[in-house]
Image (cartoon, rainbow, N blue to C red):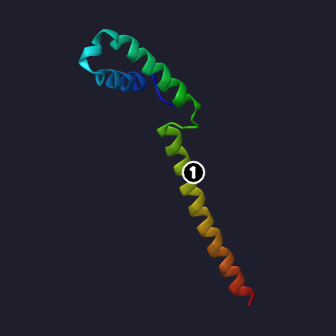
Amino acid sequence: MFDTKTIDDIANRLANAVPSGLSNVKEDVEKNFHAILQGALGKLDLVTREEFEVQKAVLAKTRSKLEVLEARVDEIEQQLK
């Protein structure tokens, strides 16, 4: 899913967007953003890029095999006519 570095980066960006008058609570805000992001993203049914790419390759291979099988079925149907 999301690694801690990514969540930390997003939380830091959000905390940096806090108005300068609230800089004394920036650390607390950043921790809260981090916790909220981790909780919300943890509930999502997400996959990593690596898992996505593996499934994409499996799908491409399956599609290729299906096309070959469809061609063979068409060939056999033509022979039976």
Instruction: Say left or right for 71 vs 50.
Output: right
Residue in view at x 59 percent, y 37 percent: 45
Residue extending furthest bottom? 81
Location of residue 58 in the rendering, given as x and y in whole percent from the top left corner: 57, 51
Left or right: residue 54 versus residue 14 is right
Percent x, y of residue 66:
62, 65
Q: Is residue 18 above or below residue 23?
A: below
**Residue toward you, 16 or 2:** 16
Residue 28 horizontal/vertical position (percent) = 40, 11
Left/right placement of residue 70 relative to residue 2 reads right
Q: Is residue 38 above or below residue 56?
A: above
Q: Residue at x 61, y 62 (%)?
A: 65
Q: Name the foreground residue: 49 vs 11.
A: 11
Q: Quadrant of residue 76?
A: bottom right
Looking at the picture, does residue 43 appear above or below residue 54? above
Q: Which residue is mark 1?
A: 58
The number of callouts visible is 1
> Which amino acid, mark 1?
Val
Residue situated furthest left in the rendering: 20
69 on left or right of 49: right
- Which residue is painted at 66% across and 80% down in the image? 75
Callout 1 environment at 10 Å: few (<14), some (14 to 19), or many (20+)? few
Q: Secondary structure at mark 1?
A: helix
In-front residue for pair 22/11: 22
The x and y percentages for residue 46 are 55, 37
Q: Residue at x 38, y 23 (%)?
A: 11
Asked where in the image residue 71 lies, by quadrant, the reply is: bottom right
Q: Nearer the viewer, residue 57 or 76?
A: 57
The quarter of the picture where the C terminus appears is bottom right
List the single residue furthest toward the top: 24
Q: Residue furthest front?
A: 21
